[in-house]
Amino acid sequence: MTAPILKPDDGALERAADTLRGGGLVAIPTETVYGLACDASNSEAIARLYAAKGRPTFNPLITHVAADGMDVREAVWVGLSAGLVASFWPGPLTVVLPFARETGTVSDLARAGLDTIALRQPDHPVASDLITAFGGPIVAPSANPSGRMSPTTAAHVSADMGDKVDLILDGGPCRVGLESTIVSFVGSSPTLLRPGGLDPALIENVLGVKLLKSTDDPDAPTSPGQLLRHYSPKASLRLEAEAAREGESFLGFGAIDGSLNLSPTGDLTEAAANLFTMLRALDGTSTAICVAPIPRDGLGLAINDRLRRAATR
Ligand code: TXA
Ligand code: MG
């Protein structure tokens, strides 16, 4: 049975909130990618969510909150963290903080047993209205099976997970198109755990310090979830290509044109928003994809990170 795709009017939001209360799974739009949401305090629901994604259970989830102080009771706002979210929330920034044991409601399973919690306030009216209607934090990993590309439209979610979720809210295509940037405040100095939709340079400007970089070691305790093979198309993927070889379909960028182009004008924001959608489109029609070089600055860091993961077999 395939989940209904609903326009997010008041009735649909109430139905979605009820589904969350009943321990169900609701696919929701955010500004970054579509998320697979459930009640962050309900371990059974979270277990179903891990199962639906086929996600390794050591991979902790991001808790999503609305702008009503839910975040305050879940975490200890150490260091410069509160100032940072004041600048960028709602938005594509996740902060990792010590979990507030006394007041926090988020289940251990959602945090994969860690003493920390990853928090973000999404910048999408459907996501925030749903969290408010539900009345508590939700977890929302990207709404794709583990190891597959993140969905940026309701149709992607329906194709990949339609038989595993209870309900899909259609909020149109995602504006950012890349997951949130994750910064940890747990160590001695703020650390970039995952490049994403918010340029780390903007974060460094506000913090007034350089971010430390986590290693890509999937076993490193500071960066659970940095699984190298994470965003994989079925087709083979060759990076930094100047031209297509026999049998390859070419994903272009800027002046290097292909059968699709991430951004003909060389705009990295546009390229980020197109990345998963265009990779998916080519993945559906060919068994070999090559991608033009993408500059390694600003959002280009996250785009290259996703491409490198997608290319790892
Ligand atoms: O843009 C996004 O953040 C999307 C949309 C749907 O909001 N959500 C998303 O959530 O990407 P999720 O749960 O898939 O993010 C998991 C990432 C992993 O890299 C995981 O290691 C990291 O968040 N993470 C979660 N909790 C953590 C923690 N306590 N410490 C370190 N990393 C953590
Ligand atoms: Mg994901």
Image: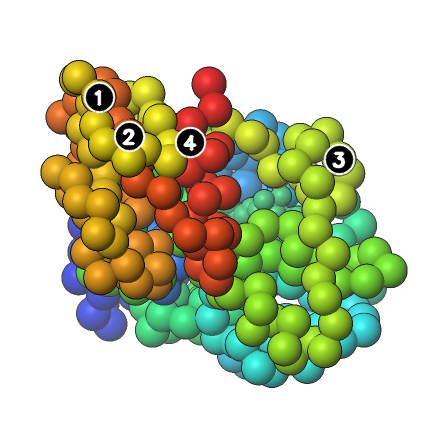
Q: Which mark is residue 245?
A: 1
Q: In this view, does 71 lie to the left or right of 153?
A: right
Give me the disc on residue 220.
3
**Residue at image mark 2:** 290
**Distance from Cα at disc 1 to Cα at disc 4:** 19 Å
Residue at figure coordinates x 47%, y 34% from the top left = 308
Q: Position of residue 175 (x, y in %)?
A: 30, 64
Q: Distance between the residues labelled 3 and 1?
A: 37 Å
Give the residue displayed 23% in from the left and 32% down from the top. 243
Picture layout, residue 251 above or below residue 65: above
Do the numbered discs 1 and 2 sit on residues whose CB atoms are within 8 Å? yes
Dot 2 or dot 3, earlier in sequence? 3
Kindly indicate the quadrant of the structure image that contains residue 263. bottom left
Classify mark 1 as within 8 Å of ligand 2 or not, answering yes or no.
no
* Distance (Cα) linking label 4 and label 2: 12 Å
Q: Quick one: label 4 or label 3, which is nearer the N terminus?
A: 3
* 4 or 2: tag closer to the N-terminus: 2
**The N terminus - image quarter:** top left
**Distance Cα–Cα, label 2 vs label 3:** 30 Å
Q: Which colour scheme is used?
A: rainbow
Lower position in the chain sequence, tag 1 or tag 4 = 1
Mark 2 crowdedness (10 Å alpha carbons): few <14, some 14-19, many ≥20: many
Comparing labels 1 and 2, the label whose residue is closer to the camera: 1
Q: Can you tell which quarter of the image residue 63 is in?
A: bottom right
Q: Name the residue under label 4.
A: 310
Q: Residues within 10 Å of mark 1 (few under 14, many from 20)?
A: few
Disc 3: residue Cβ within 8 A of ligand 1's nearest atom: no
Which kind of residue does numbered mark 1 sit on? Arg
Mark 3 vs mark 1: in front: 1
